[in-house]
Amino acid sequence: MDTSLITMPVTFKVGDIMSEDEFFRFCQMNDTLSFERDKNGNIIFMSPTGSFTGKFNLRIANIIFNWLDRNAVAGELFDSSTGFTLPNSAVRSPDLSWVSKAKWDTLSEDEKEKFAPVCPDFIIEVRSKSDDLRYLQDKMQEYINNGCQLAWLIDRFSQQVLIYSQGNEVQTIKSLDVQLSGDPVFPGFVLDLSAIEKS
């Protein structure tokens, strides 16, 4: 991979000067752009994903959605444009995420209309060509620290998958020719990553 193409997201170091509602309104007023916010309140500008990565993300989402539907798994699946306010106050938008019905039903309708104050139970991040790996690894650990049960970081460019889960060391699989198990969040689910990568 050409490391000259790797970039860090642009961070506006504004500190904690916006409330959650103000940050939400800021994002709505600039809805052609994509933002996250770190736990210190700094605003992070996220660049659009490349076309191949976007296609890759959508195929994974379609497989997971169909499996959840067939197996009547109670919960909500979200795309990459969805923001969540984590317990540490960071606002993050994973490439794909799932929240159990038990968690989702505790939220008010107003909370669901904004950046829902909940950490998803399951998260996928797919590394784009310009993404810094260390930055993504830090985000994945942040998800776990805030209550996520299972998270996959799929790194197409280093041909590896990093698996994060509660109470376990990070597992690194040095191949994309792999079948990923959804246990314990989705017992019985297996994602054949090699079939998606070759399609």
Image (cartoon, rainbow, N blue to C red):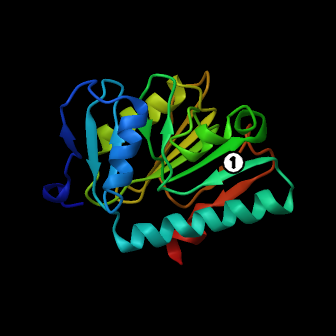
Which quarter of the figure has residue 2?
Answer: bottom left
Q: Is residue 73 left or right of residue 14?
A: right
Q: Residue at x 58, y 70 (%)?
A: 59
Where's residue 44, x and y in %?
27, 42
Which quarter of the figure has residue 38?
Answer: top left
In this view, 190 is above or below 40? below
Say what secondary structure mark 1 lies in: strand
In this view, 35 is above or below 86? below
Q: Is residue 135 left or right of residue 60?
A: left
Where's residue 191, x and y in %?
66, 58
Where's residue 189, x and y in %?
76, 53
Camera-nearest residue between 81 and 95: 81
Q: Residue at x 37, y 73 (%)?
A: 51
Per the image, the residue denoted by label 1 is 181
Q: Residue at x 40, y 73 (%)?
A: 52
On-image quarter of the N terminus? bottom left
- Residue found at the very far left of the displayed protein: 4
* Number of marks: 1
Camera-nearest residue between 171 and 62: 62
For badge 1, the amino acid type reads Ser
In this view, 198 is above or below 157? below
In this view, 89 is above or below 76? above
- Residue found at the very far bottom of the displayed protein: 199
Neighbours of disc 1 within 10 Å: few (<14), some (14-19), many (20+):
some
Q: Is residue 155 left or right of residue 171?
A: left
Where's residue 151, x and y in %?
56, 40
On-image quarter of the C terminus? bottom right
